[in-house]
């Protein structure tokens, strides 16, 4: 099993420790991406990725190796602490660069068979909205199964977290790892994902187009009978 972890910050605080603990319990090959260390660009809204090709993004050279790490993984872990009730700016900037990967445009077929986990911690509140920030992108990418784990740590850093809270994290990550390993190789997207993809299929089939998205869907065979979760 290959695991790619994307951290929304460079420092190794509470969120890092929770995500790393889960990754290690999956007993696989772990690849880590730290933001903004490994990618510090902001989307400039040029729309080249959507209208033409991702290779025309001004940041394509820096982004491509990270995209490869996402595509090669069996499990994706997006981990961001709560910053004013949302993900860090670095995580948001990273996810902004993948609008072209949404199902309405040019989703990567391997995503439909992957599992992913969104992880966040907060000194107080804001976990729900922060998890949604990450889960929205994963769902629109077509990821087959997405888990969410938000934890109020009531501490500024991991070393200040209570032992009781750390034990709870250990129990939760153990249970989550067990679920992920049990589903390995057997992931199917939800009915909601399949329904949305089918809706996009109908749009593409009824209105043939030679734009970047239309060409991609034809190449994948998705305007016909093929589906990414059946390849």
Image (tube, grey):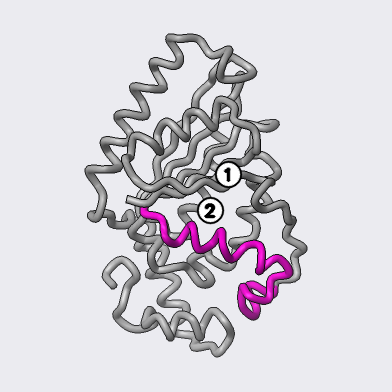
Q: Give the residue at mark 2.
A: 137
Q: Horizontal and vertical percent for residue 39?
A: 67, 53
Q: Give the residue at mark 1.
A: 133
Q: Do the residues labelled 2 and 1 touch (CB within 8 Å)?
A: yes
Instruction: Judge by depth and name the residue closer to the eye, 203 or 216.
Output: 216
Numbered mark located on residue 102 in the image:
none
Q: Does the magenta stretch include residue 69?
A: yes
Residue 9 in which image quadrant: top right
Q: Does the magenta stretch include residue 63?
A: yes
Query: Which secondary structure, mark 2?
Result: helix
Q: Horizontal and vertical percent for residue 112?
A: 37, 61
Residue that appears at 64% across and 60% down:
97
Residue 185 in which image quadrant: bottom left
Residue that appears at 37% across and 51% down:
2
Quadrant in which the C terminus is drawn:
bottom left
User: What are the residue bounds of the magenta stretch?
Assistant: 48-74
Magenta segment's dominant SS is helix
For residue 183, side relative to residue 153 (left or right): left
Q: In the displayed structure, would residue 173 be above or below residue 43?
A: above
Disc 2 from disc 1: Cα separation: 7 Å
Q: In the displayed structure, would residue 138 be above or below residue 165?
A: below
Instruction: Judge by depth and name the residue closer to the eye, 168 or 51.
Output: 168
Q: Report crowding for label 1: few under 14, some 14 to 19, many 20 or more residues within 10 A (C-alpha).
A: many
Query: Which secondary structure, mark 1?
Result: helix
Residue 98 in which image quadrant: bottom right
Q: Horizontal and vertical percent for residue 171?
A: 33, 22
């Amino acid at each position: 099993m290959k695991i790619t972890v994307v951290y929304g910050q460079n420092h190794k605080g509470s969120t890092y420790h929770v995500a790393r603990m889960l990754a290690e319990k999956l007993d696989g090959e772990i690849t880590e991406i730290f933001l903004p260390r490994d990618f510090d660009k902001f989307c400039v809204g040029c729309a080249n990725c959507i209208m033409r090709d991702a290779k025309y993004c001004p940041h394509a050279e820096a982004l491509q190796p990270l995209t490869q790490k996402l595509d090669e993984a069996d499990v994706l872990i997006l981990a961001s602490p709560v910053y004013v009730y949302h993900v860090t700016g670095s995580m948001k900037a990273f996810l902004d660069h993948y609008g072209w990967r949404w199902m309405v445009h040019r989703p990567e077929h391997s995503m439909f068979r992957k599992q992913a986990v969104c992880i966040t911690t907060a000194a107080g509140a804001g976990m729900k909205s922060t998890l949604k920030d990450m889960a929205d992108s994963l769902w629109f990418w077509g990821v087959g199964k997405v888990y969410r784990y938000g934890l109020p740590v009531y501490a500024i850093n991991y070393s200040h977290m209570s032992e009781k809270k750390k034990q709870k994290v250990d129990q939760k990550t153990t249970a989550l790892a067990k679920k992920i390993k049990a589903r390995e190789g057997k992931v199917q997207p939800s009915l909601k994902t399949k329904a949305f993809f089918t809706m996009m299929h109908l749009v593409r089939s009824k209105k043939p187009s030679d734009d970047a998205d239309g060409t991609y869907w034809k190449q994948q065979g998705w305007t016909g009978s093929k589906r990414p979760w059946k390849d």
